[in-house]
Amino acid sequence: MDLSRIEWRKASYSSSNGGTCVEVAGARDAVAVRDSKDPDGPRLAFAPAGWQTFTRRVKNGTLDTG
C-alpha cells in the first residue's frame, strides 16, 4: 500500500508540546496511523472495520496490550 501521498492529520488529543502524538490518514480502503515524531518510521494500516474495533476497545479499556 502506497502511503506516500496521503494527507496526515494529528489526533485531536495530541498536544503541541512534544508529547505522545499520533497522526491518522484515510487511504483508499484503509485507515493509516503513524507517530508524528517519526513521520518516516513505521506505519500501521487498518481496514475500516478493524480501525473502528481498535478505537472502540482503546476508548473502553478492553484492548489487551499484554
Image (cartoon, grey):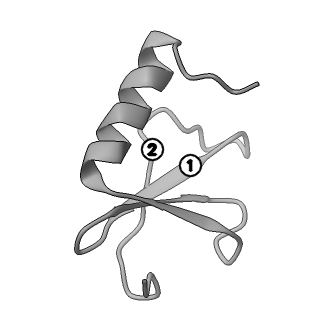
Residue toward you, 48 or 11? 48
In the rendered view of the protein, which quadrant contains the C terminus?
top right
Query: Which quadrant of the view contains residue 51?
Result: top left
Q: Which residue is mark 2?
A: 11
Secondary element at tag 1: strand
Q: Which residue is mark 1?
A: 22
In the rendered view, tell whether residue 66 sits above or below residue 24.
above
Residue toward you, 41 or 15? 41
Kindly indicate whether the residue at mark 2 contacts the one at mark 1 (C-beta within 8 angstroms).
yes
Which amino acid, by three-letter code, is at mark 1?
Val
Secondary element at tag 2: loop
Query: Which quadrant of the view contains residue 65?
Result: top right
Residue at the image point whose x is 26% and y is 52% from the top: 48
In the rendered view, tell whether residue 3 sits above or below residue 31.
below
Residue 1 on image: x %, y %: 43, 83
Q: How many numbered marks have been drawn onto this rendered protein structure?
A: 2
Residue 21 on image: x %, y %: 62, 46
Side of 66 where 43 appears, left or right: left
In the rendered view, tell whether residue 58 sits above or below residue 45.
above
Crowd rating for badge 2 (residues with CA inside 10 Å; few <14, some 14–19, many 20+): few
Residue 34 on image: x %, y %: 57, 60
Mark 1 or 2, nearer chain start: 2
Residue at the image point whose x is 71% and y is 60% from the top: 37
Crowd rating for badge 1 (residues with CA inside 10 Å; few <14, some 14–19, many 20+): many
Side of 62 where 46 appears, left or right: left
Which amino acid, by three-letter code, is at mark 2?
Ala
Residue 55 on image: x %, y %: 40, 32
